[in-house]
Amino acid sequence: MIAKIGSALSKVFSKTAPDPFVIAVGLTVLTAVLAVTVGYSDQGGAELTIADRSKLMIDSWRGGDGLWKFLAFGMQMCLILVTGHALAASKPMRGLIDALARVPKNAASGAAMVGFFAMVFGFVNWGVGLIVGALLAREVARSMRARGIRAHGPLLASAGYMGLLIWHGGLSGSAPLKMTSKAEAESVLPSSVVESLTVDGIFEGVSLSQTVFSPMNLFVSGGLLVIVPLVLWLLTPKADPAGDDEIVEMPMSSDPVMADIDDGRLKGFPDWIERSPIVVWVLAAMLLAAYWRFADQSGVLRMGPNEINMVMLALGLILHGSVRSYVSAAEDGAAGCAGIILQFPLYAGIMGMGVSSGLVEDFSQWIGSFANETTGPLLTFVSAGVVNLFVPSGGGQWGIQGPIALSMGGEVGVPAGKMIMAVAYGDQLTNMLQPFWALPLLAITRVKAREIVGYTAVVMVVAGGWMAVGLLVF
């Protein structure tokens, strides 16, 4: 029954989900229209002509807090994806994946195991979780086929996507990482919002102990590691010996992630140095030393995207063992950055128009009118889930919704850390309906987006209830 519900939902969403870039353009136009028609009331809006408002809107869209505000942040997110992809494609990681693929004895245990490890790695780094999940799903399908076990390919691919259900509460979560220091916060949020969190001229940031490693998040994320594999187990279609069933096996293809780039023959010094571990080990040592220096001065729980990327880059270099191998894997991973590069400027422009026109402040006050200490985080959680369907980027979404969430939290007395996680939970939850970040996984598994969304939607409903419980209990 549960499996049939998932299949039915897949058919619905496959017909209604436009390309995320189209949505970003539509949101830009909508925000511009709202800014011109109802915004700028705090600047004598009644006395401003449409032409005046249009000029203010265009200036805020193109200005320093508009289109180009997320350039540095976009690069950080690209590096998280690329370094995670490269780490997952290293030989040691591939060996681990191959070993795990031989463990499941039936289709249900295969889906549950893939989902569990996709989430474990997704908590560490969303790029690693996405690629490990995809590779593990494919290798489990291969292993089962070789052993004569029928496994449902779309469900395995759905399980491989589960890292995106837990990532924003993990070590690479955009919102928690961007609030660890004033410099990081200012790179995404408007200066007025950052100043509102400053006490006696000091902005100490929101430590990861108040977000990622808070009791609430450990409860929520730990529970998901148990609940989601169980749901995936129950979603597994039953094979019918007569062949009249919904089992769809995963298409088998050549490995798109890593090619055999070393034929064993050296062609001079450049070829030797590219294959030698010396260069990558020297750089890795320098990166780890830099991270140690940061941790010694600021503390491990103050790390932001830059520190995460340093560690991921160092680990990837060590595991690949050569420039040639690492660069090849990184180039393959860079293909997944197209959406970030194209859409982040649009998200920044939306934020710029929303803040400048007063739309963000007005919306915050409207939501706040329904909120109190209990309902505020829940309203933020639900609204974040809706926003993520239109802005499928945790970083872009935090830039837009962060000012609203933090302002509401300040008004109703909810700690900043809890409001940050409320946005994070809503964002990661509806990734199960928004397959934007699944593109690398779909390329590896050769499964279509419309074939997985129904299953991920069922998981989303159960996981959403668990996240809401966490926000209410803590």
Image (cartoon, rainbow, N blue to C red):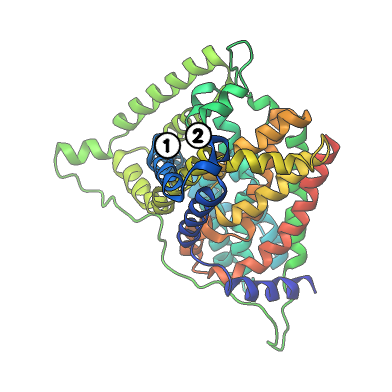
The residue at the far right in this view is 473
Amino acid type of the residue tagged 1 in the rendering: Lys
Residue 259 found in image quarter: bottom left
The residue at the far left in this view is 268
* Observer able to see residue 127: yes
For the point 78% across and 28% down, the residue is 413
The one nearer the camera, 219 or 90, is: 219
- Of helix, strand and loop, which one carries label 1? loop
From the viewer's perspective, tell me whether residue 311 is left or right of residue 116.
left
Whole-percent x, y for residue 308 in the image: 50, 31
Whole-percent x, y for residue 181 in the image: 55, 22
Q: Which residue is mark 2?
A: 188
Q: CA distance from mark 1 to mark 2?
A: 7 Å
Q: Residues within 10 Å of mark 2 (few under 14, many from 20)?
A: many
Contact between labelled residues 2 and 1, with CB atoms less than 8 Å apart: yes
From the viewer's perspective, tell me whether residue 410 is left or right of residue 346.
right
The one nearer the camera, 355 or 318, is: 355
For the point 40% across and 60% down, the residue is 256
Q: Which residue is mark 1?
A: 69
Whole-percent x, y for residue 87 in the image: 46, 42
Residue 73 found in image quarter: top left
- Of helix, strand and loop, which one carries label 2? loop
Residue 337 to residue 376: above or below: below
Q: Quadrant of the C terminus?
A: top right
Amino acid type of the residue tagged 2 in the rendering: Val
* Observer able to see residue 401: no
